Amino acid sequence: MNKLFISHPIYQARILFTFILMMLVACEKDSSQVPPPEQPAPQVTVATPLINDVTDWDEFTGRLYAVESVEIRPRVSGYLQSIYFEEGSLVKAGDLLYVIDPRPYQAILDQAKSELTRAKAALELAENDLTRAEKLYKSRAISEEELDSRGSQKRAAIAAVESTMATITAAELNVEFTHIKAPVSGRISRTRVTKGNLVTGGDFDSSLLTTIVSLDPIYVYFTADEHSVLHYTRMDMAGTRKSSRMTPNPVLLRLADEDEYTHKGQMDFVDNQIDLATGTMRCRAILENPGFLLVPGMFVDVKLLGEGPYEALLIPDSAISVDQTIRFVYVLDENDTVERRQIKTGNMQDGLRVIRSGLKKEDRIVINGIQRVRAGMKVLPETSTIEISVNEQG
């Protein structure tokens, strides 16, 4: 009975499984007693920070605006007779743009001139009558009341002449206003009204004919946040950088298709308060634009002079690690042991990052191989130097 039970296949499989399990446990115990091989210290490249004089330029996004932007509207009403410009072309101040049919206004002017002739004749008659009345009054041929009447007639005639002259001046202006000229130089837009249409003049609800924007010079507007405003104000108070309110601090511009900031200008306006809706302050710079490359309405990248020149420590951006909001680098001590050092960074300068605080000029920083190290680890350092590339300098 026992012999049959032992020879059963299921029982034999259980015995074999138990034997294998015992062998594996024994092997694991033996292997746990053998210490793992020591990992060699990783090789890294280290360098001390580069020391250089730098100037900070703060970056903003701006938009270009014309210094002068004019809506061309008629001062008198009438039918548009002629158009004397090409849409989208450059015009100069004083160029003739439109002519409104001047005939009705010319007729009013001619009528006023004829009224002036009549008024002058009436004045001449009144003067002669007064002169004769004065002689007759001396000989007591007329009464004093008659003399006063003749004097009153002369004064009325003088007033009529002056009134008619004022009417002529107004009529001459209306005739002049039928010829609409460019008030500023710049680029003109399309015409909103074509020949033969009635246009309405005056101070209210006048017809918009076209617009002109000046091109040279040109404004760039941008906004600075509250932190930047405080930073500039404190530098002005400390005497390290003058406020742009009183000093034309330099600015640099870069267009959407450009890599370098090649356009130069200067600050000429800072607003008087923080915008309550955006928490920013509006600023403006002015630039020369002789080739008309800069066009009102374009978005541009703006650099404003920040701080400097001052001596700063610079390291590659690739040597900086980020843990949530904390920036840090790996630094070696005298025993080549890695230490994590928290830093405060500044702007980029010539392809390198300015270090505001956290490093000393003699610190050895891991600039290559930071993925293989952690704090407290010993490493095999290879010394290198940090340099500014020729392309970045150019």
Image (cartoon, grey):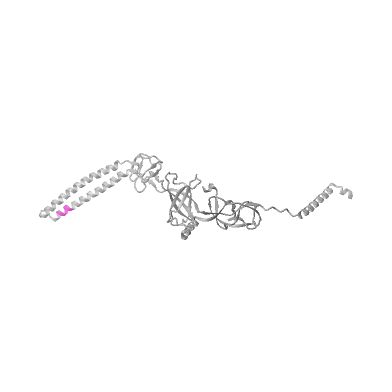
In the rendered structure, the answer to whether residue 291 lies left or right of residue 328 reads left
Query: Within the magenta stretch, is there residue 226?
Result: no
Residue positioned 24% across, 49% down in the render:
163
Quarter occupied by residue 147: bottom left
Q: Tell me residue 190's x, y (percent).
A: 40, 41
Q: Is residue 157 left or right of residue 67?
A: left
| Magenta stretch, overall SS | helix
> Is residue 2 in view?
yes
Q: Measuring from the top left, give residue 78's x and y in whole percent.
A: 33, 42
The quarter of the picture where residue 178 lies is top left
Q: Nearer the viewer, residue 114 or 251?
A: 251
- From the viewer's side, name the closer residue of 5 and 376: 376
Residue 96 in picture, x, y percent from top left:
34, 42
**Residue 278 seen by the camera:** no
Q: Position of residue 35 (x, y in %)?
A: 74, 55
Numbered-mark total: 0
Q: Is residue 226 left or right of residue 101?
A: right
Q: Which residue is at the front of the view, 37 or 221?
A: 37
Residue at coordinates 30% horizontally, 46% vertically from top-left? 173
Magenta-highlighted residues: 146-151
